[in-house]
Image (spheres, rainbow, N blue to C red):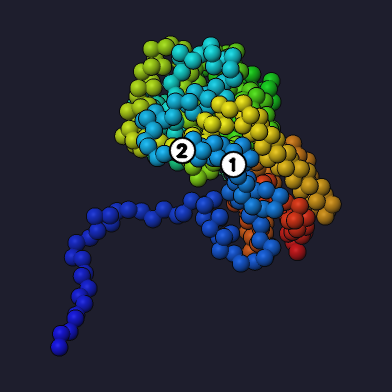
């Protein structure tokens, strides 16, 4: 008879990783996981910024659906893309942001590189700045901001400086402090700008305010990096949403970086479809910059994912699909606008204490309610309504079937019920 014995190996040396700290899970992804695990039938997810249709389901855009069919009919393969990404995608993405006329003017001064969505675009921008600028520029980031901005740049060794963007008292953009910050920045600092649909406040500068911001940046010799994750998704119109980028490049003739994502405006969240581009004032500098981007991309991801880029390039190059996409943008932004109004009316209708006008002044995917963390927690625990700790809600999570419940619950919570 044979007997099997199992021995437990007890390591004698401390782990190679014993110095690794424990990092708490990313708040917004952890919230999605909590929501998914919740079994309550009336649960509502207003956390992560992902578009949902009027029945609360993810939506594959009609243009994207068609584009997938075109690709399948053409015979889709899984070959590597070039290191810089799909050429037509890079070209069309930068043309979309700049508009045809400005694109034609600056195309020989452009450095473009496909990226892993908007995060990857920001990261490549950071890598590029780190490898080309000494001393390292300071990165100025508006507060509040998207939860990942600081992490992307500080993980690359940059000093990140928060500056007030939003006044909690007036519930609007704090233009005075914004300009005072810009005027006090050291020359050659980098400023992160939300091109539109400011995340989390939903509060963008007006056109006149953008002009003032741009002029201040030019005077102070600051370098703008636009985080443009919502072009077309904000207003339903790409040209309106790209105003700031086009003004800075076309009118002020500034050098800029632009980080594009097709997660929201084409619903390509998980395909990681993005692009980073830089407009330079010299053709040789652009050629060199692009060569640096190519080297950085090679050492990091080798070459970017193909499927989303092919879908987006097909939509952007086929006039019929592009027209369909413009309609999809109207559908998404229109539904969000309608839900914003429905929530506003519901809050007032249910007598929610306070003034809610800011909700309808804001635009884009998010509403910034201005609730205390205690109320946010109570909404989750008692009513199974999930939102970010700072009371940012993804309006796309509202629909005709839950908006009244949400308004009633917020009103109840604020009355202490
Ligand atoms: C959000 O702000 O909720 C989204 O952009 C998702 C994310 O990656 O944080």
Which residue sits at x=22%, y=60%? Answer: 14
| Residue 73 in sight from this viewpoint | yes
Which residue sits at x=46%, y=22%? Answer: 278
Report the disc number at residue 215.
Answer: none
Which residue sits at x=35%, y=24%? Answer: 292
**Mark 2 nearby-residue class (10 Å; few <14, some 14–19, many ≥20):** few
Q: Nearer the viewer, residue 235 or 313?
A: 313
Q: CA distance from mark 1 to mark 2?
A: 16 Å
| Element on which disc 2 rests | loop
x, y percent for residue 219? 54, 14
Q: Which residue is mark 1?
A: 65
Q: Nearer the viewer, residue 14 or 58?
A: 58
Q: Which residue is mark 2?
A: 75
Which residue sits at x=21%, y=69%? Answer: 10
Q: From the viewer's perspective, tell me whether residue 405 is left or right of residue 12.
A: right
x, y percent for residue 20? 32, 53
x, y percent for residue 389? 59, 51
Query: Mark 1 or 2, which is nearer the eye?
Result: 2
């Amino acid at each position: 008879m044979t007997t099997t014995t199992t021995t437990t190996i007890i390591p004698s040396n401390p782990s190679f990783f014993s110095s690794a700290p424990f990092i708490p899970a990313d708040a917004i992804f952890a919230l999605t996981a909590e929501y998914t695990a919740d079994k309550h039938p009336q649960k509502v997810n207003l956390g992560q910024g992902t578009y949902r249709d009027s029945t609360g389901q993810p939506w594959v855009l009609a243009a994207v659906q068609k584009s997938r069919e075109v690709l399948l009919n053409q015979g889709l393969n899984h070959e590597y893309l070039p290191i810089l990404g799909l050429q037509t995608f890079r070209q069309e993405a930068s043309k979309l942001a700049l508009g045809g006329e400005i694109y034609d003017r600056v195309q020989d001064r452009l450095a473009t590189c496909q990226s892993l969505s908007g995060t990857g675009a920001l990261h490549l921008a950071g890598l590029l700045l780190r490898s080309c600028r000494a001393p390292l520029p300071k990165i100025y980031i508006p507060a509040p901001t998207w939860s990942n901005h600081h992490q992307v740049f500080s993980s690359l060794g940059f000093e990140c400086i928060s500056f007030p963007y939003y006044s909690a008292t007036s519930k609007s953009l704090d233009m005075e402090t914004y300009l005072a910050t810009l005027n006090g920045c050291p020359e050659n600092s980098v400023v992160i700008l939300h091109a539109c649909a400011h995340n989390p406040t939903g509060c963008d500068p007006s056109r006149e305010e953008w002009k003032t911001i741009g002029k201040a940046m030019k005077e102070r010799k600051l370098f703008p990096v636009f985080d443009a994750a919502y072009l077309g998704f904000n207003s339903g119109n790409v040209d309106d949403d790209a105003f700031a980028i086009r003004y800075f490049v076309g009118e002020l003739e500034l050098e800029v970086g632009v980080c594009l994502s097709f997660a929201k405006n084409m619903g390509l969240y998980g395909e990681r479809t993005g692009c980073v581009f830089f407009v330079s004032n010299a053709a040789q500098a652009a050629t060199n910059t692009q060569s640096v981007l190519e080297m950085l991309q090679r050492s990091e991801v080798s070459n970017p994912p193909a499927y989303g880029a092919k879908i987006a390039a097909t939509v952007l190059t086929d006039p019929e699909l592009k027209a369909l996409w413009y309609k999809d943008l109207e559908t998404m932004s229109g539904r969000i606008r309608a839900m914003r109004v429905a929530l506003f009316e519901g809050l007032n209708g249910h007598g929610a204490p306070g003034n809610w006008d800011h909700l309808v002044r804001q635009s884009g995917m998010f509403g910034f309610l201005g609730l205390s963390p205690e109320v946010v927690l109570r909404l989750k625990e008692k009513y199974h309504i999930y939102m970010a700790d700072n009371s940012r809600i993804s309006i796309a999570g509202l629909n005709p079937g839950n908006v009244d419940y949400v308004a009633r619950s917020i009103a109840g919570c604020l009355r202490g019920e």
